Image: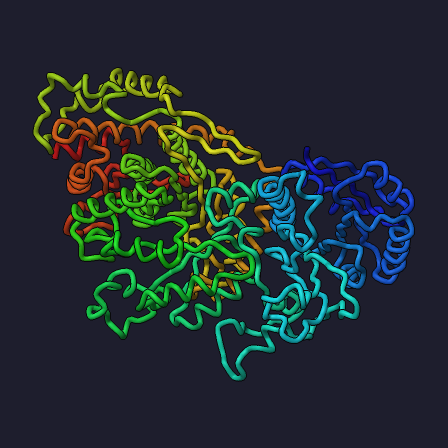
Amino acid sequence: MSKLIIACSLENCVHVGGVMNFLRLAEEKGFRTHFLGPAVPVENLLDAVVEADPEYVAVSYRLTAETARNVFEKLETAIIERGLERYKFILGATEPVAREAAGFDIFKKIFDGHTTAAEVISFLDSILQEKSLQEKNLQPEKKAHLSQQDQEPSLENQDDSQPGQEKSYQAPTPGHSEQKNRNSSKAHRQPGQDLEQEPGREKKRYPGQESQQELEKEPGKGSENEPVQESGQESQQQELGKKPGRELRQERSQAKDLLERIKRKKPLPLIRHHYGQPDLETTLQGIEKIADSGVLDIISLGPDQNTQEFFFKPEKMKEELSGAGGVPIRKIEDFEKIYQASRRGNYPLLRCYSGTNNLIRMAEVLQETLDNAWAAIPLTWYSELDGRSKRDLLTAIKENTAAMKWHGDRDIPVEVNESHHWSLRDAPDVIAVVMAYLAAYNARQNGVKNYLAQYMFNNPAATGYQMDIAKMLAKQELIGRLAQGKIKEEEETGLKAEREGKDESEVGRKITEDAQINEGRNSQINKDRNSQINEDSDFHIEEEGNFQINKGRNFNIITQVRAGLASFPADFERARAQLALSTWQSMVLKPDIVHVVGYTEADHAARADEVIKSCRIAGHIIEKSLQDYPDYEKLERIQARKAELISEAEFLLDTISRLYGDSFEDPLASPEAIYQAVRQGLLDAPHLKNNQVARGEISVKIVDGAVYTYDYSEDIVVSEKERVKRLLRG
């Protein structure tokens, strides 16, 4: 049975907004809730506790701290007199009231105005995980016979703080960072942290008191953790956010598996941020600080270019370029140090970009050292196409897809960094949509079961707000077909049968105009595709709690969104606004992961404190978006552009299939066919001009916010059918 939480605002406090939000989140996590109302007297509250016998009692008090002290003393006395100490009380309050509450033993949890929805969800999830562990590991008939010290320790009996908490209200004790002997030395209480009775302990921490981490810091040792001095509320929040070191029980706090972590944080998405400073020691210190803050779930490690290209051939590294683009990692032990630095706070997952050479060897290292949450692999890039590797394009595609297969064989999730690279080079929107589909399709065909579809908004930076949403919705729908049984395989679309008897056997042969733009045949193909819904025997919807993943042919799609870096101004105030705007915009896709781009990135790689601030900005926007988000996808202009992009993308995909279909069994997953499509200009971008392998001949223009192929000589938008006809006619 779901656990019951009863709640109210206490005594003379009539403010119920915070407690109602708490109950809403609790209900979404599966709890039963009952709201008693505002300004409930202590005696009435305790009468309700006796009658309802809840697991938790949530109370809110948001008036003055001096009055709160009297109210809490009254509540504590009444609880003791009526013998109700076994009930667990939770408090939501303003920061001054929370400081007063820290002196009372009755509150199991204290949340203040700085508490985020993610922190509340983490607390609620810890209750559910505790119940699950007890049911799994302890037989009910045995529980009564076990002594307290013999029982499996629960979250509530640990002195670890919950992930993501922001404040500390009491001074640390000497040696607090050594958390091994917890039974003999209890950790001190913070809002959102379990409170155990301990005679004589100090109960409060105020701004200006050092945390144990500060006391243990080496004198005179500078680091990027020392940000530019700020004033006012922000600097006070930073001081309050410093916490004593602690050791969290991984199995009790945060899931190690990506899918489980997504499920447990619902309805909120996971938050990811890129991080890597040009010095290893600074990076290690920053990872510790980020993990302790609890504001993100995934640290995306950014190695420098030397690491990505020459980790296995250090003799080729250019020392003068050390730290360019990220953290210099020169030994396997460096990866291990990075992993260990993250084993604290909320235990964030780690993931790292693949190398640009020796992809599978690098994948082995990342799995062994970082327990890489997922792989990030391109389809065509990290090659002569972009210069990030010396690999020729065909070799790169083969090696990239082989790396996909290596991860797929081991059930490791894969993200294919492909589509946004074309938009970064000003490709028309239709090519970006096609490459999003090809990336996902190649991952699926190479055995990837859990696929991270990344959607980079504001790319190119001048893209219009509505047209950007339309482009992403078009990508999402096409990729979604791979998980819903709408398979883009020749045997299932009838393309192969239609080609039989046609004279198209030679790869690269130009398609006749009739074959290109036969509207009737293309319409029938699209109709056939759309009719193939749920016909795969292994297609189903897996639903567990609030977590749902579409499955088709064992292909699960995880939606990840982010902002394009080029959209960020160098001015920090404007960049913060862009971060908020883009985060709000991207929530239209209902993402599982939000990749936060730091507001400083247009000026410099975000330091640890800037990562934390950026994640807090994004986190606030995400929480607000869950309350009453507009139905942007229903806007007529967005629907029209989405339909236009899907139609044109289907045409280009069909063209590639027919052009190379007689030479390759599955052209859309053939490295050779994709290579030829780039060589011939079917896949092209303006910034590839003078590239030795691509055409770079396409011209584009942003019209009403959308990126179209454009003929400047005639001053007209060029449809995809017309572009392909011109291209293949020479």
Quadrant location, the C terminus: top left
Nearest to the observer: residue 295 or residue 621: 295
Residue at screen point 34% across, 64% down: 325
Nearest the eye: 240 or 570:
240
Residue farthest along the front direction in this orientation = 145
Task: State the colouring used for the structure image.
Answer: rainbow
The number of callouts visible is: 0
Quadrant occupied by the N terminus: top right
**Residue 67 location, x and y as percent?**
88, 59
Quadrant of the rendered structure where residue 114 is? Answer: bottom right
- Tell whether 540 sits left or right of 646: right
Asked if residue 343 lies left or right of residue 58, the reply is left
Q: Is residue 304 above or below residue 682?
A: below
Q: Determine the residue positioned at 43% across, 45% down.
A: 457
Q: Residue at x 49, y 59 (%)?
A: 599
Q: Is residue 431 something that shows in the picture?
A: no
Using the image as rendered, state which of residue 569 and residue 498 is in the foreground.
498
Q: Quadrant of residue 315?
A: bottom left
- Is residue 6 in sight in this rendering? yes
Percent x, y of residue 301: 40, 59
Quarter of the image holding residue 711? top left
Residue 404 in the image: state x and y as whole percent.
29, 44
| Residue at the extreme bottom of the image, as rendered | 220
* Horizontal and vertical percent position of residue 184: 67, 67
In the rendered view, does 468 fall on the left or right side of 679?
A: right
